[in-house]
Image: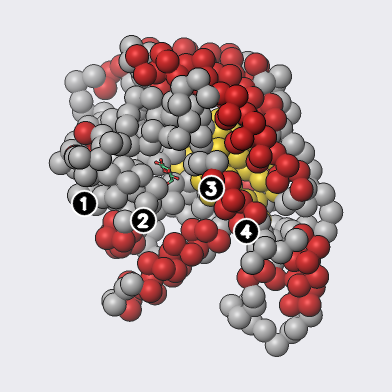
Amino acid sequence: MKLSQSAALAFAASALAAPSLTTQEKPRAAAAACASAVTLDGSSNVFKKYKLHPNSFFRKEVEDAVAQMSDSSLAASAKKVADVGTFLWLDTIENISRLEPALQDVPCENILGVVIYDLPGRDCAAKASNGELKVGELAKYKSEYIDKIVPIIKAHSNTAFVLLIEPDSLPNLVTNSDLQTCQNSASGYRDGVAYALKQLNLPNVVMYLDAGHGGWLGWDANLKPGAEELAKAYKAAGSPKQFRGIATNVAGWNQWDLSPGEFSKTSDAKYNSCQNEKTYITTFGAALKTAGMPNHAIIDTGRNGVSGLRKEWGNWCNVKGAGFGIRPTSETGTELADAFVWVKPGGESDGTSDTSAVRYDSFCGKPDAYNPSPEAGQWNQAYFEDLIKNAKPKF
Ligand code: BGC
C-alpha cells in the first residue's frame, strides 16, 4: 500500500486519537513524519536528537525469518531484531522502489538511514557485489539512480535522512589501484561520489562517506592518501553543508575499542596503529582534518559482537560465528564518533559460496566464511540464527 504523505498524516491522527490501543497494537503507519519541514545541521551530531529508524524492509525480512523458527525462545529473541535501527540499501535502480514504502512509518523522532550503492563498475576489487552498472555508465548512474532518489527525499521534506555514500568505493581506489578493474572504475567512482554528495545535499539530509575500516585505510601508508582521496570528493562536490564525515566498518567485523586489537600480534602490525575502530576514526579523523574535510564518524556495529573469528584481517565474507553487536546509539564516549549504527542488515549475505556463480569470490570460499551462503544481499536464515545466538549484548 502506498500512502501519500497527507494520507499517512491523516491516518496517523486518527490512530493516535484511539487511546485504547497499546503501543504494540498501534498500527505502524501511526508513526508519521514531522508536522513541518526538517532542517538538519551538518555541523552537529544529529543522532543526539534522532534515533536510527528500524526500517520496514528489514522488519519484514526478520518477521519472515521468525515465521520459519520452531525454537520459541530463539524466535522471541529474533523478533526484537526487527526493532533495531538499520540502514536500507538502495543497491539497484529497481530497488529505489523500496524507499517510498520505507518512508511511511518514520516517526518525527527517528531518522531513516539509507545506503547509496550503485556506482558503475561497483566492487572493483572483489566479485561478490559487482553491480548492474558497467564502467562507463556514469551518465546512467546520475540520471537513473541519483536523480531518481533526490525527488523522493525532497518530497519527504518532513522526514530526516542519514545517507551513507558508496561503501568501499574510494578506499578501493586508494589500496587497489594495481588492479585493472579498479583503474577502470576510478574516474566513475570519483565523479559519481562527488555527484551524489552534491545532489543529495538537501536540508533534511546528513551524509557520511564510506572510509573502509582500520584494517584498510588504517595502515600508516594509507592514512594520508586515503584522507586526500576522500577530501577530494568532498571538495569536488562543493564542500556540501550537510556533509558530516565518514562511515567505517560498514558490513565489517572490527571491534570498537578492543585493546590490544585483534590483529596486533601479526608480524606487520607495527605498520598499523589503528588496531580497533576507535583508534582508526581518531587517527584517520586527524588526517581528514589536515586534508580539509569534516571528520565525524558513524561506525557499523551490526555484526561485530564476537571477536577473534577471522584468520586474516582482510577476510570480509560471511564470517563464521559472528554475532549481532552493540545496538545503535549516540552514546559512544568519543566526540568524533557520532553514533554506532547498524548498516549491514544482519542475515543478508555478503556473497555466494557457489563456486560456479558469476559473482563467486574466493573470499566467500575461505575456511572462516559461512557455507552455504546465497548471493550478496540475499537472506541466509541459518546465518541470521547464528547472529542472534552469538549476539553481544544478548537479545
Ligand atoms: C550487496 C547488496 C546488498 C547489501 C546489503 C551488499 O554486499 O551487494 O546487494 O544490498 O550488501 O545486504
Label 4 near label 3: C-beta < 8 Å? no
Of pointers 2 and 1, the one earlier in the residue sequence: 1
**Which residue is denoted by mark 4 in the rendering?**
101
Of pointers 3 and 4, the one earlier in the residue sequence: 3
Q: Quadrant of residue 140?
A: top right
**Which residue is denoted by mark 2 in the rendering?**
379
Which residue is at the front of the view, 168 or 299? 168
Asked whether, in this view, residue 244 is left or right of residue 79, the answer is right
Label 1 near label 2: C-beta < 8 Å? no
Whether residue 247 can be seen here: no
Which amino acid does the dot numbered 4 rest on? Pro
* Crowding near the residue tagged with mark 1, few <14, some 14–19, many ≥20 C-alpha atoms within 10 Å: some
Looking at the image, the residue that sits furthest to the bottom is 20
> Regarding mark 2 in the picture, which secondary structure is present there?
loop
**Which residue is denoted by mark 1 in the rendering?**
372
**Which residue is denoted by mark 3 in the rendering?**
95
Label 1 near label 4: C-beta < 8 Å? no
Label 3 to label 4: alpha-carbon separation: 11 Å
Q: Is mark 3 within 8 Å of ligand 1?
A: yes
Of pointers 4 and 1, the one earlier in the residue sequence: 4
> Regarding mark 4 in the picture, which secondary structure is present there?
helix
Label 4 to label 1: alpha-carbon separation: 31 Å
